[in-house]
Image: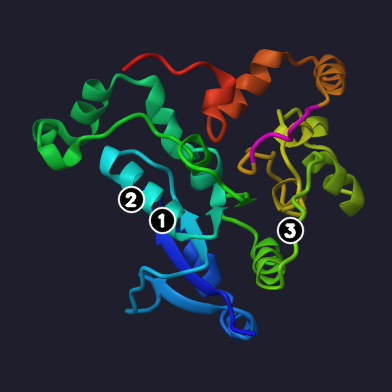
Amino acid sequence: MAKPRVAIFDFACCEGCQLQIINMEEAILDLLNVVQPVEWREAISDHSDEYDIALVEGSITRPEDEERLKDIRRRAKILVALGACATTGGVNKLKNHINSDELKRCVYGAAAAMPHLDTSPTRSLREIVKVDVEVHGCPMSTREFVNVVRCLATGTTPVTPNYPVCVECKMRETICRYEYNEVCLGIITRAGCDAPCPAGGQWCFGCRGLVDDPNVNAANDIMAKYGRTADDLRRRMELFNSTEARPCPRQ
């Protein structure tokens, strides 16, 4: 049976998730046994308009990028969103809370009016096209990425964790960051990363997005136990989940 043809594309992002793939080094060879890369700007010079699986990194911030994404979607049998920028809009979505003209003046100064700097409110891929699978995180987990690619290559459906990071902290016997008087988003953030941030002495940033049905009552209980409020959580959420934290104003 022919191996699925895979193309990797990127939009507004740091391309850190693609670097995660490159950093797999020899492990990439195992994936090449089950898929055939046909386009990947960061690693190969080949170009193809024919592919079965499109792996897409980055958020959409320009009208022309929206049209390009729609074209990728039309060509791909399966579209996978890679990383926080693609799945939630990521850090890029912070700009949605600032007037576009003011934002460009702040960043680019006298060059703000140049046409190539035109921008629009940041959107995740699923806000524009149908996304079949999401690989969450900033950067994404290579372990999860390998599992997703292998599942798609063999025609099975990847399973994305839909429980909070707190579960993984408990499995690792990591001391809760609230015990250190910190506000941690692990109680509402989707697991699957193996909770490296709390284990490494840092609160969860929420880069994997929210679980589908957060246990609000449990979250409120934790806030009350440690003398915190829902607003404390919302302020933390703005980094990677700004749309969830507050509505986007009109541009």
Q: Which residue is mark 3?
A: 158
Residue type at the position of mark 1: Ile
Point out the stretch of residues depicted in magenta.
209-214
Instruction: Give the label on residue 108, or none.
Output: none
Position of the N terminus, as image quadrant, is: bottom right
The residue that mark 2 highlights is 68
At 75% from the left and 37% from the top, the residue drawn is 186
Position of the C terminus by quadrant? top left
Which mark is first along the chain, 3 or 2?
2
Q: Is residue 27 above or below residue 142?
A: below
Q: Residues within 10 Å of mark 2 (few under 14, many from 20)?
A: few
Residue 43 screen position, x and y as percent: 40, 76
Foreground of the two, 123 or 206 = 123
Are circles 3 and 1 on residues that touch, CB within 8 Å? Answer: no
Q: Amino acid at mark 3?
A: Pro
The relative height of residue 4 versus residue 65 in the rendered view (above or below) is below
Alpha carbons under labels 2 and 3: distance apart: 26 Å
Q: CA distance from mark 3 to mark 1?
A: 21 Å
Tell me if residue 213 is in the magenta stretch.
yes
**Residue at 73% across, 13% down:** 229
> Tag 1, which secondary structure?
helix
Is 195 part of what is drawn in magenta? Answer: no
The image quadrant of residue 238 is: top right
Residue underneath mark 1: 72
Would residue 16 be found to the left or right of residue 138 on screen?
Answer: left
Which residue appears at 55% of the width and 43% of the height? 87
Residue at image position (36%, 68%) is 49
Residue 48 position by quadrant: bottom left
